[in-house]
Image (spheres, rainbow, N blue to C red):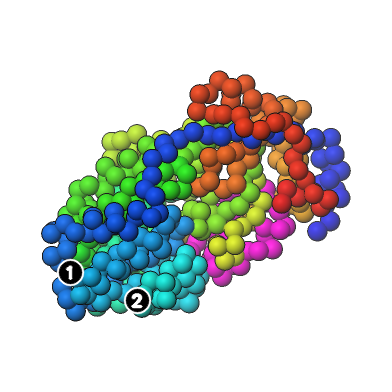
């Protein structure tokens, strides 16, 4: 890539010095070594344990997100089911992710340490679905074929704010039942009416599934801002409907976000499906897509998590765990050749088409290295002080306990009791190719 013309246009733009800052959030968590006991204690309730009989085939979901301690949580569920004499198996429940293929979904699951050897039970991956019901307005409801044939289903999923819509049920157990178990076929039918109707459809389809599929319970996990397991709850189908909305509010309350409202430029080192369904969580990056038509707060609650906004967003690279899925790159303004070269279209396109959000996989303005990406971002920030730009750099939208800010933001950092300076002002550590890493 020859960037000579762009370099010349941006030659008057200097990259500012940066300083490391720690953001303080709720730190309470369940330690990994305690998770198996907590999971099994949750499952001991008679309302749940009495539904698991010797010899039953029990299907356990595994999603596509980078859920903290997911392998430990699922192994604890598997062990408890075995203790009761039933026969557990795990199945990928991730809609159209993994390139909408069984092989791709199995690769994602295995990448989280959820393997047959580690879990001690079979993993059954298929894109086949079976219709199990119709919604109250007459639409067919599909779930994974293996799950539909099981004697019982245990949903395992993280409860958190969704990246595209707001409602009483967002990312969580209800969505795992509808989108995750629905595979590509089921997910497509739910997305067909667009994200402005998603909150209603998750509730509508979810209730149909909980009524007609052999769902025994759901294990909901909430994470704190440090990517640690904060809470685990086992809910019966009726409790999922009744209690998940309150768990979602709790998850939003402790969710990590950028504690500065405005910046000229946000630099995101990496995006990926293991970080967020959108590669980078718009609740953190402030990049809610224009096409969502989200009816914000239709459940009567205040859905706002952060006021953060940046005039320009740079994405430098993809995570290894995203396996080339560049979904969410379309939310950035500027990227690098290093990032674009890693994109595998067949990994992202099925997901984008199924979700009806093809703008998520568009390619932003692309330059050869990180330094030039930063210069272009500063150059094109209308109204910014080009000599003292307000820049924030994060590793990704999931790991934001430590960030970097430019010198111009120091007064705001010093005035915020939840922000702590932990470094010294220094030039960005660019290598001889102009890259930060």
Nearest the eye: 248 or 332: 248
Return the mark for residue 4.
none
Give the residue displayed 74% in from the left and 40% down from the top.
428
Position of 28 with respect to 154 (left or right) is right
Q: Residues within 10 Å of mark 2 (few under 14, many from 20)?
A: some
Whole-percent x, y for residue 43 in the image: 22, 59
Callout 2: helix, strand or loop? loop
Give coordinates of residue 332: x percent, y percent: 61, 48
Q: Give x and y (percent) for residue 304.
A: 41, 35
Residue plotted at (45% across, 35% down):
25
Q: CA distance from mark 2 to mark 1?
A: 16 Å
Q: First in sequence, mark 2 or 1: give its number.
A: 1
Give the structural element (helix, strand or loop) at label 1. loop
> What residue sits right under mark 1 in the picture?
52
Q: What stretch of residues is rendered in magenta?
A: 326-354
Q: Residue furthest front?
A: 33
Q: Quadrant of residue 383?
A: top right
Picture coordinates of residue 47, whole percent (x, y): 13, 59
Q: Is residue 307 depicted above or below 216 in this figure? A: above
Q: Does the segment drawn in magenta span residue 329?
A: yes
Side of 130 where 151 appears, left or right: left
Q: Is residue 410 left or right of residue 28?
A: right
Q: 28 or 106, which is in the foreground?
A: 28
* Disc 2 target residue: 121
Residue 167 shows in the view: no
**Quadrant in which residue 78 is drawn:** bottom left
Quadrant that contains the N terminus = bottom right
Residue at 47% across, 57% down: 66
Residue sitting at x 41%, y 36%: 26
Closer-to-camera residue (429/205): 429
Tag 2 and tag 1, C-beta contact below 8 Å: no
Magenta stretch containing residue 307, yes or no? no
């Amino acid at each position: 890539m020859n960037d000579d013309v762009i370099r010349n246009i941006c030659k008057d733009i200097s990259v500012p010095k940066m300083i490391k800052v720690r953001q303080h959030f709720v730190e309470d968590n369940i330690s990994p070594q305690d998770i198996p006991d907590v999971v099994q204690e949750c499952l001991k309730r008679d309302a749940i344990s009495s539904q698991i009989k010797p010899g039953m085939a029990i299907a356990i979901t595994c999603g596509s997100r980078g859920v903290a301690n997911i392998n430990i949580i699922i192994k604890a569920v598997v062990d408890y089911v075995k203790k009761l004499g039933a026969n557990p198996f795990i199945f990928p429940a991730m809609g159209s992710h993994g390139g909408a293929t069984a092989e791709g979904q199995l690769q994602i699951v295995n990448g989280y340490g959820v393997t047959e050897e580690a879990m001690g039970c079979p993993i059954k991956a298929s894109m086949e679905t079976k219709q199990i019901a119709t919604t109250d307005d007459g639409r067919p409801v599909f779930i994974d074929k293996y799950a539909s044939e099981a004697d019982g289903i245990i949903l395992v999923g993280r409860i958190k704010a969704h990246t595209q819509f707001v409602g009483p049920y967002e990312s969580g157990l209800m969505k795992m039942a509808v989108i995750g178990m629905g595979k590509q076929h089921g997910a497509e039918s739910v997305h067909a009416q667009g994200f402005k109707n998603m909150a209603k459809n998750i509730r509508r389809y979810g209730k149909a599934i909980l009524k007609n599929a052999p769902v025994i319970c759901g294990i909901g996990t909430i994470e704190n801002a440090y990517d640690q397991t904060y809470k685990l709850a086992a809910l019966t189908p009726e409790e999922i409907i009744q209690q998940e909305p309150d768990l979602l509010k709790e998850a939003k309350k402790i969710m990590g976000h950028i504690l500065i409202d405005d910046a000229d430029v946000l630099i995101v080192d990496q995006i990926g499906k293991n970080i967020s369904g959108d590669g980078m969580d718009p609740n953190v990056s402030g990049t809610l897509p224009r096409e969502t038509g989200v009816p914000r707060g239709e459940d009567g609650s205040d859905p706002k998590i952060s006021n953060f906004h940046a005039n320009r967003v740079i994405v430098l690279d993809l995570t290894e765990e995203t396996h080339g899925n560049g979904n969410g790159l379309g939310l950035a303004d500027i990227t690098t050749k290093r990032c674009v070269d890693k994109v595998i279209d067949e990994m992202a396109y099925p997901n984008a088409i199924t979700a009806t959000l093809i703008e998520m996989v568009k390619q932003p303005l692309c330059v050869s290295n990180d330094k030039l990406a930063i210069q272009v971002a500063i150059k094109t920030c209308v109204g910014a002080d080009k000599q003292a730009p307000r820049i924030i750099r994060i590793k990704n939208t999931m790991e934001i306990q430590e960030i970097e800010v430019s010198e111009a933001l120091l007064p705001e950092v010093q005035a915020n009791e939840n922000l702590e300076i932990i470094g010294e002002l220094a030039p960005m550590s660019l290598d001889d190719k102009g890259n930060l890493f």
